[in-house]
Amino acid sequence: MTRPGGTPTPADLVITGCTALVHDDQEEAGFVEDASIVVRGGVIETVTGGGLPRPDAVEHIDGRGQVAMPGLINCHTHAPMVALRGVAEDLPAEEWFNDHIWSIESNLTAKDVELGARLACAEMILGGVTCFADHYFSMDAVAAVVAESGLRAHLGEAFFSSQGPEGRERSLEFALRHRGAADGRITTALAPHAPYTVDDADLAATAELARDHGLPVHLHASESRAQTETSLARHGVTPIEVLERTGLLHHDVLIAHGTGIVERDLPVLRDAPGRIAVATAPRGYLKFAWGPTPVRALREIGVPVGLATDGAASNNSLDVWESMALTSLVQKSAEGDPRWLTSRQALHHATLQSARAVGLGERIGSLAPGRPADIVLVDLSGPHTQPVHDLAATLVHSARSADVRTTVVDGRVLMRDRRLLTIDLPATVAELGQRLPALLDRSHGRRIQAYDT
Amino acid sequence: MTRPGGTPTPADLVITGCTALVHDDQEEAGFVEDASIVVRGGVIETVTGGGLPRPDAVEHIDGRGQVAMPGLINCHTHAPMVALRGVAEDLPAEEWFNDHIWSIESNLTAKDVELGARLACAEMILGGVTCFADHYFSMDAVAAVVAESGLRAHLGEAFFSSQGPEGRERSLEFALRHRGAADGRITTALAPHAPYTVDDADLAATAELARDHGLPVHLHASESRAQTETSLARHGVTPIEVLERTGLLHHDVLIAHGTGIVERDLPVLRDAPGRIAVATAPRGYLKFAWGPTPVRALREIGVPVGLATDGAASNNSLDVWESMALTSLVQKSAEGDPRWLTSRQALHHATLQSARAVGLGERIGSLAPGRPADIVLVDLSGPHTQPVHDLAATLVHSARSADVRTTVVDGRVLMRDRRLLTIDLPATVAELGQRLPALLDRSHGRRIQAYDT
């Protein structure tokens, strides 16, 4: 690009001297040494190796000793639930929901959601997350925090059938009003909670709304094997079959968890007319003593599996880096096969598959010309990441979220050298802290919903 | 303590304003708010709460916003193997040993071991580890690095029967020569490699040496279920029964891994005359697709289980913090019980049980008057550790090794505000890097040992 008169216009941002993770035509990860990444108008213009002369740019980041990779994508979370991190520990899911979380959540205000979301965005930016899929309540507040923080997000206003048709209507209204907001960084989804809290009629109505408005759907389904068994006992069908018979699988559906997906679900998912993806959050499954998402079986039928953390009230963190490592480790263990889910496969889940899971497969998940500049720089100078014999393994199995030094979304630097540039963390922690006594009060005996799968 | 004349002598070190993790008479963890920790002569003099006036001290650390806890103990590692971090990935154990690690290790020199150990100590100090149990070769070099780095260590020179009696004799000679070295920070053990590489006669001879010299034994045993099955098929006994019949269980034995410990081993371990402990390194077991150490069964028979990382060539890190979290998560999953292995139990493994595992149960593992001042300060101001509803859960499930800001051993500050004070990391990485081509050469076709359980 040139100015009138022929002088090249400076780029907005250039990152030099880094090693850049790129994908080839077969989606294999490779590494470009001594790479320069030029960003203009929020978009990656070039990724070139070999230490070319530094182009003129408004902002320059020296990436020596660091790896540039696509920002991590948290494919399923409830960001504001960081406010409840550690509030109910070491419990089975049913007790955790009924006696603690859904009781506390009946106190939730939009202000709590705003502060929780802001704290969560701080955590995610520090951990190299550039995009998150959120499924919660008072989502206007989350959208506002996304706009101010600079992150990218895929948002849905959750609903239960117990809320009556208003729940579903609110979810639609949110999805339509925020679609494309925050300079296009916000995409939206319809967000029924789950087949065990949203009845078939409501799910079928959601499928119609998805069709009429061209909206994807983000919901919990087949979260655990126990849910699948209960569904079979009560209704004669699995939760995935419920999605099919209510017409949802004709549309783009992001299924959270899917650890209860069984053999008979596989052809259903494989033959679905819509684009189906699953988000896996392995830490919480270990903690609840659930099994793992059947990643290998899903791969065989071509269903992308994105990485996620779920909410911090169960997962205790929004650390997608940990989800990447744990997905590799747990899958090896579950399949009894140390050769399966290699570091390169884990990186594929973290990048391209996660981008597809949140419906942004054509846009994010890869450092390639024309894509939005959602980039993180990872410092490998720490002793725990030295020496480097296999860079993919170093990234997946030795590096940690704390090694991310710089986080960039749409070409805007949100964290530089571990300093948050868009969020006032101490003020957020202090203000949230003042609200916690009211938030945690359970003396009212109410619940937002009963957990009874 | 007072100077002649009645003026109190200044303490060597005082940490103020922190929250201190302490244990009560029943070994329950508790937290002292606004605590002051006074250290004199390398020993904790007092731990007092309530923000008393700061005592006069040579060195002062402001611990506000931080938790002081006993330094982590890595109960089984091969520190110098950090040089091979990532060199052989996504492989079954047999192939990993035979085609890669034991081939590369035939090139190993004392200089490689020294540099690897120094890099490893840097990683461990940064990760809040104050003591490690190492089982490797050229251990004089490791002992020298322990002395210079300021860490505490429990060291053993490994041997195979394939080395002839010289291996065992070298192990004894090392253990006697270094016992009590580095101002008492080094303790030693006899270190036969494993029942599948050390024959019964050699194990029996080791048991006699343990008796004659009052030395503990540190070895691999029952590493995987496959090893137990092979041992039963070939010898009619389990690896644990091999330890019993060779007399080793009459002495203090630290067993690395024990994922192959089976029902019939439990009474053997329970009734052993010696003090038996197991070190668990859960990350590597997931990676090799081994099962977990049977922590619950070991607890029921009173065998302490310490936390470990194994070597970084399999584990990819020396992150004991991660071992703590994974032990909790994997045990919940393996037992199908989310109520089991709570955060407080995980902290018990990380502190008192780990101290017992390395034979230092009367000295380290607790912040108590009269114990050596092996202390780490953990910063909880990051968004990923806020808010704090349950401090034990925050420590185990939200905090990370990178949150350790200060590491103290025997009252000496080895890291302050994440700055290493006793190790030159860039020089170590650079010097090790120069030696890697020679270390990695496998053209000779040699192996130090065959893996054939």
Image: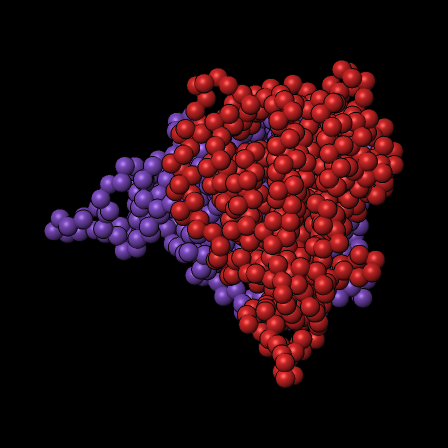
Chain colours: A purple, B red
The image quadrant where one finds the N terminus of chain B is: bottom right
Position of residue B15 relative to residue B174, above or below, is: below
Q: Can residue A24 be seen at all in this image of the molecule? A: yes
Location of residue A111 in the rendering, given as x and y in whole percent from the top left corner: 60, 66
Residue B334 placement, left or right of A380: right
Question: Which residue appears farthest toward the bottom when viewing the image?
Answer: B5
* The one of B432 and A230 positioned closer to us in this rendering: B432
Q: Going 23% across and 51% down the picture, which residue do you hit?
A: A56
Q: Going 66% across and 63% down the picture, which residue do you hit?
A: B43
Q: Going 55% across and 48% down the picture, which residue do you hit?
A: B146
The image quadrant where one finds the C terminus of chain B is: top right
* The one of B316 and B360 positioned closer to us in this rendering: B360
* The one of A357 and B290 positioned closer to us in this rendering: B290
Q: How many marks?
A: 0
Q: Can residue A286 be seen at all in this image of the molecule? A: no
Location of residue A210 in the rendering, given as x and y in whole percent from the top left corner: 57, 41
Q: Going 55% across and 61% down the picture, which residue do you hit?
A: B413
Question: Which residue appears farthest toward the left when viewing the image?
Answer: A5
Location of residue B437 in the rendering, given as x and y in whole percent from the top left corner: 40, 29
Residue B167 placement, left or right of A98: left
Location of residue A81 in the rendering, given as x and y in whole percent from the top left corner: 64, 56
In the picture, residue B203 is in which quadrant?
A: top right
